[in-house]
Image (cartoon, rainbow, N blue to C red):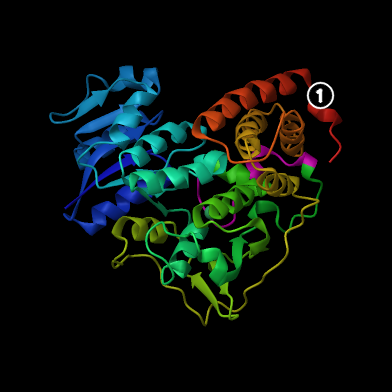
Amino acid sequence: MKNIVILGSTGSIGTSALDVIHRLGNQYQVLALSANNNTDLFLKQIHTFHPRFAAVLNPISYDKLKDQMPQGTRLLPPEIDSLMFIASLPSADLIVNGLVGAVGFRPLVAAIKAGKTIALANKEPMVMAGKTLMQECERWQAAILPVDSEPSAIFQCLSGLAGKNNYAKISDDISRIFLTASGGPFAKYEGPLDEVTPAQALNHPRWKMGKKITIDSSTLMNKGFEAIEIMNLFNVPEEKVQIVIHPQSIVHSAVEFNDGAILAQMGEPDMRVPIQYAITYPQRAISPVKKLDLFETAKLEFFKPDLERFVCLDLALAAARSGGITPAVLSAADEIAVQAFLDGKIKFTDISKLIYTTLRKVPSTGGIATINQALEADTWAREEASAILNEGTYKDAVL
Ligand code: MG
């Protein structure tokens, strides 16, 4: 019996994870769940899965839920410490981190320090301080299993090469990682990007996901984050990561080895496959996911990304080269910019301008950000990006 904790249980990762657990049956037990705003769904999940602990960060959600807990479930106070507590429960075997943004950073650190195995979909912490987090994993004997489809694909391609979390020498054996991207809703869009609306940007052609990651996919920032994530997770240098636009989303990523052999992980685009693999790892289990029909898969296309049109990807790769706190600033500024776009305060093309203007203010670069430096950089960058947003100075940025 495996005890599972899910952070972000009402989001797209959390609901898929619960769907997987439900189908896998009684080998898995839900020990704790966390959510934020969707109290109706959260309550349903609590009644279905009977977790011992439930946590919400939003105090309004807490007030709504506090008198509705069934017997056997304890609702924890609405604070980040509650997420850190459930992420490090001694009886937890697997922590599924499906949180969005930097809010998942401290719960992830708590899970690592408790030596847990973490199924990680929350990519921002791996962008903010991925190298340090991997060092901490080694120190505390924790393991990160990627959940996102492309990092999971790379993880699966590399599985013959290394033991859990021991990627120290992988870079010597591989010549390239092909990190694929659907390209988002604007991959083939020829109109002016500064006029696209949040509704258009939220209309992703392949994946149904939360708003933040969907906007990040439309700007290709999501692919930039994934590039940084896999560099940190698998200890590969930036020059070995080739981003490939692949609109069909059948090849979920591929690894080329020194002898020229390429292993690719393929399948219908369905998040339940990588989520289930992280839960059942190293075993595989039967899944209801539609199987790929090779005869129907008439054509697979691969393109180079257009870095001049999708500036966010260029900014992310530059931040990866700069190192230090720059990726943490990138991530925080992106959260502010994406929210401002969703709120109708800025244009689509202003997302990259706001991030760029914030990045220009980073005092120093280089080295590896510590946990505290990453958290401080996150706070600093949010304030800086918000000030730049209010002043409107991002409009002058020439990219
Ligand atoms: Mg992805």
Image quadrant holding the C terminus, namely top right
Cβ of mark 1 under 8 Å from ligand 1: the answer is no
Q: Residue at x 61, y 37 (%)?
A: 331
Q: Is residue 208 magenta?
A: yes
Residue 203 visible? The answer is no
Q: Residue 260 appears at what percent x and percent y?
A: 60, 80
The residue at 19%/56% (across/down) is 25
User: In the rendered view, does 241 fall on the left or right side of 210?
Assistant: right
- In the image, 327 versus 104, the foreground residue is 327
The residue sitting at 56% across, 68% down in the picture is 172
Which corner quadrant of the image does residue 62 belong to?
top left
In this rendering, is residue 276 above or below 303? Answer: above
Pinpoint residue 259: horizontal percent, then vertical percent: 58, 81
Q: Is residue 207 above or below residue 108?
A: below
The mark total stands at 1
Q: Which stretch is magenta?
A: 194-210
Determine if the magenta segment contains residue 310.
no
- Label 1 element class: helix
Q: Is residue 121 left or right of residue 6?
A: right
Give the residue number, with chain letter if any, for mark 1.
Answer: 393
In screen coordinates, is 320 left or right of 38?
right
Q: Is residue 387 above or below residue 159?
A: above
The amino acid at mark 1 is: Thr
Q: Residues within 10 Å of mark 1 (few under 14, many from 20)?
A: few
**Residue 385 horizontal/vertical position (percent):** 68, 25
Percent across and percent down for residue 246 are 63, 65
